[in-house]
Image: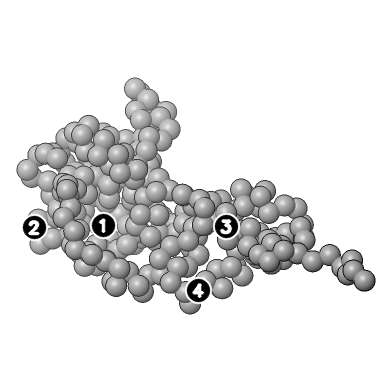
Amino acid sequence: MTDDTATSAPGQPSGPDDKTAKLRLLEALLFAAADPVSEVLLAARIGPGWDVTVLLAELQAHYAPRGVVLLRVGGGWAFRTAPDLAPLLRQEEEVARRLSRAAIETLAIIAYHQPVTRGEIEQIRGVATSKGTLDILMENGWIRPGKRRESPGRPLTWITTEHFLDHFGLEHLRDLPGVEDLRAAGLLDSRPVFYGVTGGGDDGLPLPRADDGDED
């Protein structure tokens, strides 16, 4: 006598509406994606009748104690190495090219003042900004052109990208570090400073004065 009860093959979902199947699909989509995936796209792939936010929260809780964790990055979600394991994974390696002080200052100004024009960047820094500095930041995927300013000449503005948030481990721009965090990271030094960039408080964010031109 044969058993007519339908069974699923090992490793396959038991049905299209099974919660475990949806979590597995969500997990696979995030692991396969090269960049953070938006909730809108994930919801479209999961299908109607499921709250993708609830599923993401459950998946995030599942991975919380593991070596990789699920994080919200900018406007999307992505798997990343657990922050506490970073020191164990870090390796000493030769960096082919370091960002110049001019590039660091320019990136900080764009991050804290965006959208900001090249002229405004130069006004804050007090020196001319070479096209090469902006090119380097674009090549790293940290900035991109924004909308043109509705003013004479319609100058182009600059804004940071999702990759900027992802690279620096930020969920939102409001998570940008304060003065002490930047100093601890070595982005501020004891040389003369000016107060042209504002962060999260009333005090200005000091940056090193670029008195050596804009060499990259």
Q: Is residue 114 visible?
A: no
Quote the CA–CA distance across marks 4 and 3: 17 Å
Quote the CA–CA distance across marks 1 and 2: 16 Å
Most extreme residue toward the front is 1
Which quadrant does the C terminus fall into? top left
Marks 4 and 1: CB-CB under 8 Å? no
> First in sequence: mark 1 or mark 2?
2
Q: Please state if 28 lies on the left or on the right of 49 as rendered.
A: left
> First in sequence: mark 3 or mark 2?
3
From the viewer's perspective, is the residue at label 1 or at label 3 nearer? 3
Quote the CA–CA distance across marks 1 and 3: 44 Å
Q: Please state if 207 lies on the left or on the right of 69 as rendered.
A: left
Instruction: Give the residue pinned by disc 3.
Output: 28
Crowd rating for badge 4 (residues with CA inside 10 Å; few <14, some 14–19, many 20+): some
> First in sequence: mark 4 or mark 3?
3
Instruction: Give the residue pinned by disc 4.
Output: 64
From the viewer's perspective, is the residue at label 1 or at label 2 nearer? 2
Q: Is residue 43 visible?
A: yes
Most extreme residue toward the right is 1
Q: Please state if 28 lies on the left or on the right of 21 as rendered.
A: left
Marks 4 and 3: CB-CB under 8 Å? no
Say above or below: 42 vs 70: above
> First in sequence: mark 2 or mark 4?
4
Instruction: Give the residue pinned by disc 2.
Output: 191
Q: Secondary structure at mark 4?
A: loop
From the viewer's perspective, is the residue at label 4 or at label 3 nearer? 3
Q: Residue 204, which numbered label?
A: 1
What amino acid does circle 3 point to? Answer: Ala
